[in-house]
Amino acid sequence: MMRLSRHDWVPLVLRLVTGAGFVAHGVAKLERGPGVFAATLHGMQVPVPTVMAWLTILLEIAGGVALLAGAAIRLFAVPLSVVLLVAMVKVHWRFGFSSIKLVAFTTAGPQFGPPGYELTLFYLACLAALALGGPGSLSVDRALACRRRGPSLGVPSDHS
C-alpha cells in the first residue's frame, strides 16, 4: 500500500480549489448566457466577442476539470493565465489590490464594492505552482505515467 506524504496532498489541494473556481466561473457565464458575456467583452473592446466568450467559457470549464483531475495542467496553464491577465488588466486593475471591499452591512447582508486584482493573482500563483511543480501523485497524469512505466515502480513523488 502506498503511503502518502504531505507533499502528495499539497498539489491536490491547489488543484481542487483552483479547478473548482474555474469551473464555477465558466458555468456561471454559461448559465447567464454566452451572449451576455459576449456583450461584456464587446464593452471591453475585446475582438470577436462572441467567439472569445465561447472560447473563454469552454476553456474555464475544460481547464477547471483538467485541474481537478490533474490532467494536462501545463497545457491549460498558459491559456487560463491569459484569460486571467485580460480580466486583471481590463476589469480589476483600476480597483486596486484588495478583492474584499466591504461597503456596508445591511439587513440583506454584506454589500461589497468592485473586486480588485487580489484573487486574480491568487489564481495565477496557483497555476504557476502547479505548472512548475506538477499535478502531484494523486493525479491522472501521474497514474498514466506509472501505467506506461509499469506497476512495479509504484507511484513516484514529485520530490524524488
Image: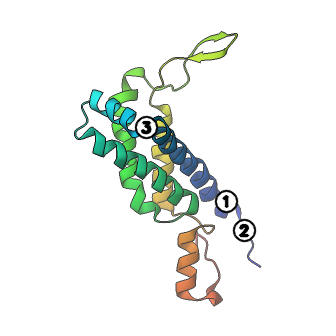
Badge 1 vs badge 3, beta-carbon distance below 8 Å: no
Between discs 2 and 1, the one toward the N terminus: 2
Dot 1 lies on which element? helix
Dot 2 lies on which element? loop
Looking at this view, is 27 or 126 the one in front?
Answer: 27
Q: Quadrant of residue 3?
A: bottom right
Q: Is residue 27 above or below residue 94?
A: below
Badge 3 vs badge 2, beta-carbon distance below 8 Å: no
Name the residue rendered at 51%, 64% in the picture: 134
The location of residue 111, given as percent across then percent down, is 59, 15
Dot 3 lies on which element? loop
Q: Is residue 92 above or below residue 12?
A: above
Q: Which residue is mark 2?
A: 4
Could you tell me the amino acid type at mark 2?
Answer: Leu
The location of residue 121, given as percent across then percent down, is 46, 38
Q: Is residue 36 left or right of residue 104?
A: left
How far apart marks 1 and 3 lie (CA) works out to: 36 Å
Q: Is residue 111 above or below residue 66?
A: above
Could you tell me the amino acid type at mark 1?
Answer: Trp
Q: Which residue is mark 1?
A: 9
How far apart marks 2 and 1 lie (CA) works out to: 8 Å
Residue 33, disc: 3
